[in-house]
Amino acid sequence: MNKATLETNLRNEVMAAIAEFITKQYETDVLTVSASEFALPLLDAEGNEKYALVKVSIPRGKRMDGTYEPYDGYAAAEEYRAEMDEKAAKKAASAEKKAREEALREQRRALRQAKKAAQESAE
């Protein structure tokens, strides 16, 4: 078998397992909408029908500088984790900076009010 056929068979096997699991676990329909996608009918909190789209793919990798680099899921997961950690650190730093600036504004506001109160009591 060629590489594409092997990948197609693997994808179909994974899709069948996912469809079986979802059907049993959530008692919902699994609607095949393409060779690699399912649509799952769901209800939101208000009872409106929504759909979750699930795509299954077998990535091959990338060509870089004339060479082929196979896909590495562990490396991709590590890159994603590092990216999310960096975003969380930036968000925390931003929140900390915002809190410091707000505290400084409050101090200035309190000083202005104290100064104003002192001027009014002097008059």
Image: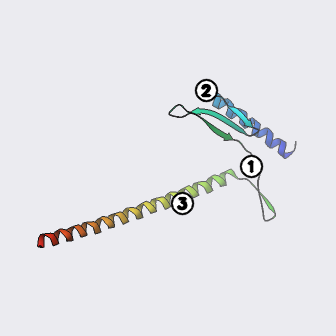
Give residue 48's quadrant in the image.
Answer: top right
Q: In this view, does 31 lie above or below 113?
A: above
Q: In this view, does 26 lie above or below 75?
A: above
The three-letter code of the residue at mark 3 reads Glu
Q: Is residue 85 above or below residue 48?
A: below
Nearest the camera: 4 or 48? 48
Measure the alpha-carbon separation of dots 1 and 3.
Answer: 26 Å
Residue 24 on image: x %, y %: 63, 27
Residue drawn at the location 20% of the way across and 70% of the way down = 116
Q: In this view, does 14 lie above or below 107?
A: above
Nearest the camera: 37 or 87? 37
Numbered marks: total: 3
Residue identifier under label 2: 27
Residue drawn at the location 40% of the way across and 63% of the way down = 98
Q: Which mark, by number, is residue 86?
A: 3
Residue 10 on image: x %, y %: 77, 39
Query: Disc 3 on helix, strand or loop?
Result: helix
Q: Which mark, by number, is residue 59?
A: 1
> Residue 27 vs residue 31: left or right?
left
> Residue 43 vs residue 13: left or right?
left
* Tag nearer the camera, 2 or 1: 2
Query: Disc 1 on helix, strand or loop?
Result: loop
